[in-house]
Amino acid sequence: MAAQIGLIGLGTMGAMLALNIAEKGFQIAVWNRTTAVTHQFKAEAGALAGQIVATETLAEFVAAITPPRSIILMVPAGPVVDDQIAALKGHLGPDDLIIDAGNANFHDTNRRSAAASGYRFLGMGVSGGEEGARHGPSIMGGGAREDWDRVAPVLEAISAKYEGTPCATWMGPGGAGHFVKAVHNGIEYADMQMIAEIYGVMRDGLGMEAAAIGDVLDGWNKGPLQSYLIEISAAVSKAVDGGKPMLDVILDKAGQKGTGRWTVIEAQQLSAPIPVIEAAVMARNVSARLEERQAGEAVFGAAPVALPAGAVTVAQLEQAMIAGKILCYAQGFALIVAASAEFGWDLPLPDIARVWREGCIIRSSMLNDMATALEQGPGRGLMLAPFFADHLKAATPGLRAVVSAGAAHGLPLPALSAGLAWFDMMRTGRSTANMIQAQRDFFGAHGFERLDQAGKGLHGPWGGHMV
Ligand code: 6PG
């Protein structure tokens, strides 16, 4: 049987994606470095086995696919991808297409796109975890448009759907797809961190039990905060293990494969402020320093203390989350705009919001509103869109009350606080950066501009030396 597409790498994500492809009626050839895994995969594929060609060598794998071949790589990001390309390319013709579907760093994808010779190359971000890979991920593609168009029928068929529209979109050349995926992951970190912060206010500040917190989150999931992450946070809050709330026995050290860190690094390179995401990555790094945190508690006393009655309401917590989410996404989309300008991409912001509406980890109902706002106001920051400006005017008082209560009672809210600070900075027409300019000119004669005089590189009357 000739396969219409091939997939290499039958780990969890690869196996799920291959089953998804087979389920949508495509004949798929599969290969895995460990042959036993390949045969076990087909043996466990049930009714879909008839559409799966299990192969034992790369030569057999390539030969099983009808040219021009499309081959998906689902292998760990990094050197393994380069090794797999090197092992494959000798078997390929100039029109055969390699598609890296892992969590590659977009710089690597840029490099691999430029180096593709004797074969073609796409890089695509695939979001949604195991469930998404099996039943419908969100897919963000990068590379030559004609290569995307060739494989799009398969990708659209297997992708998540939002009201029938596939959540699979070509973002631009080279690493554009993997860049958008990195921004997705940065926002994912921030969404998760803000939920964790609000959970902390309810647990430590209001003394609420996990199940009660889960009920609150379930309620929020019926309103503007409807999202996969709110839904699963409610579920994990209600989970029980041996009669105890599951959350109460899980160690508070967060792991990270580093995808959110890439977002922060790129934002700094682009001078694009994403303080909510930066705070979320910082919070993960701090969480990993458990022993240092325990030492700090021993010396200074535990930070979190119970809130006095009435300090914050659950309604204010919901408002804080709504405001924090809007501010975070405004920063994320602004980062995408900065990357478009820097890399000469024309990243489609409305389509990016649309492709995130289903399948991916940050999927939420608010993304549909964001797509509309981005469509209606190209070049306008998300927070200035009337729909979101109105939401912010209504919700930021709650954010301010929660951040204030957290600061006053040692409840750490780094992401929500960063969002509020950025919001206030972005509505300050006369900031304090004049002090920065004066300092820089005093010690380094770096020059400044004046309000009352034209010209740049002006200097103050301090002679440029320390007093
Ligand atoms: C997705 C996820 C996924 C990521 C996990 C773990 O979109 O399906 O973002 O790609 O690998 O979330 O990421 P961290 O280990 O960095 O939290």
Image (tube, rainbow, N blue to C red):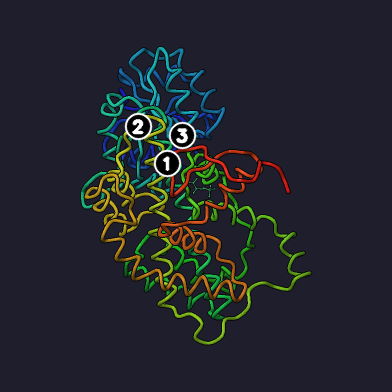
Decide which of tag 2 and tag 1 comes sooner along the chain: 2
Above or below, 266 relative to 87: below
Q: Quadrant of residue 158?
A: top left
Q: Are marks 3 and 2 in contact (CB under 8 Å)?
A: no
Decide which of tag 3 and tag 2 comes sooner along the chain: 3
Q: How far apart, in angstroms, are the residues tagged by discs 2 and 1? A: 35 Å
Q: Residue at x 42, y 34 (%)?
A: 101
Say what amino acid the circle numbered 1 marks.
Ala
For residue 40, say whether it is visible: no
Question: How many other residues sit within 10 Å of disc 3, few (<14), some (14-19) or many (≥20)?
Answer: many
Give residue 42's position: percent from left, percent from top: 42, 36
Residue 454 has which mark?
1
Say what amino acid the circle numbered 2 marks.
Trp
- Eye-nearest disc, 3 or 2: 2
For residue 356, say whether it is visible: yes
Residue 74 has which mark?
3
What secondary structure is marked by label 3?
loop
Above or below, 200 relative to 387: below
- Eye-nearest disc, 3 or 1: 1
Q: How far apart, in angstroms, are the residues tagged by discs 3 and 2? A: 25 Å
Q: Quadrant of residue 412?
A: bottom right
Image quarter of the N terminus:
top left
- Eye-nearest disc, 2 or 1: 1
Q: In the image, 35: left or right of 23?
A: right
Asked whether 26 or 316 is in front, the reply is 316
Q: How far apart, in angstroms, are the residues tagged by discs 3 and 1? A: 57 Å
Give residue 84's position: percent from left, percent from top: 51, 23
Badge 3 residue CB within 8 Å of ligand 1 = no
What secondary structure is marked by label 2?
loop
Residue 345 has which mark?
2
Q: Are marks 2 and 1 in contact (CB under 8 Å)?
A: no
